[in-house]
Amino acid sequence: MKPVQNDQPLAGRTVLIAPSVTRELASELESRGARVLAWPKLESRPVVSHASLDEAIESLFGYDWMIFRNFNAADFFLRRFQELGRDISELDALRVCAIGEETVKRLDEAQVHIDVNPDRLSSESAFAAIETYAGGRDSVSGLNFLIPRAAISHDSLAQTIGDAGARVDEVTAYRTCAADNTELAQIKGLLTGGGIDCVAFASPSEIIEFAAVFDTNDLDRLVDGIAVVCIDEGTAKTAREFGVDVDVTSGEPTIPAFAHEITALVGSSGE
């Protein structure tokens, strides 16, 4: 292998960024030799069949808890709930857990009561909050949980609750469609196969979007072993709410400073 020149410190490195990031960041990184990829833009759509969701709505009396992991889960559930002519008061008999500010806002608008709103976005934090509210792990055992989700999900919350002795029904409330499914499959493969060296987030909304792409609150698992760089402390705070260990936060919220921090962290030579 040829030695890496100082003017190409990111040669051989792959950096993943949001599709909404300005071209300036990609250009900065590419000028340093990086391969720059962006995860695909995502659209959330109704499911083809509402059969399982409708059955769950008809059987709400059989559940003790509902968990809304994100805005889409709340939004698409409530849309269908109202299409079926159901009254919001029917949810009063259940405990409701809402994860994330946008989720809380959507439920508040629909006048759905919220019992648990974890202070972090990770599945681990959500379960801890539910466990505390219920009165301990033993109190979770035997309860029945309903979790609306996307058609394809990579979240561990249902398994964690099930391991505590509860029954969990995950029902498909919506589907996520990437603008390019081939590209999405490629990104997934690179993330899990060690083909991404760094994920760079330039805003809190990008982190939420990234989680939505994979329909997971387990971002710590998704980026395990991958360097994570955030443009400012506000963005890093959101990453940490998902349980992500942030390797570097840019001291100055500018694109050149952001690129410098990425290079300093994963570059093969100093600048």
Image (tube, rainbow, N blue to C red):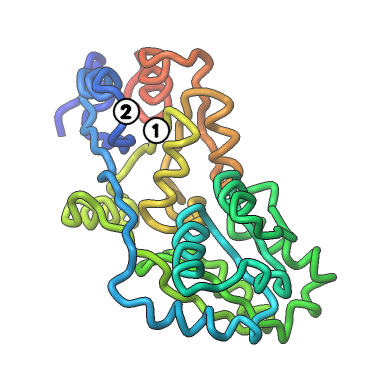
Q: Are marks 1 and 2 in contact (CB under 8 Å)?
A: yes
Residue occupying the point 50% across, 13% down: 252
Label count reads 2
Q: Residues within 10 Å of mark 1 (few under 14, many from 20)?
A: many
Residue, disc 2: 21
Q: Residues within 10 Å of mark 2 (few under 14, many from 20)?
A: some
Where disc 1 sits, the SS reads: strand
Residue occupying the point 42% across, 28% down: 202
What separation in Å lies between label 1 and label 2 (alpha carbons)? Answer: 10 Å
Residue 261 x %, y %: 43, 21
Specify whether 64 is left or right of 182.
right
Q: Is residue 77 above or below residue 236?
A: below
Q: Amino acid at mark 2?
A: Val
Give the quarter of the image for residue 241: top right
Residue in the foreground of this view, choosing between 63 and 191 = 63
Residue 115 x %, y %: 74, 60
Give the quarter of the image for residue 200: top left
Residue in the foreground of this view, choosing between 153 and 100 = 100
Residue occupying the point 52% across, 25% down: 249
Q: Residue furthest front?
A: 85
Residue, disc 1: 200
Q: Is residue 228 above or below residue 5?
A: below
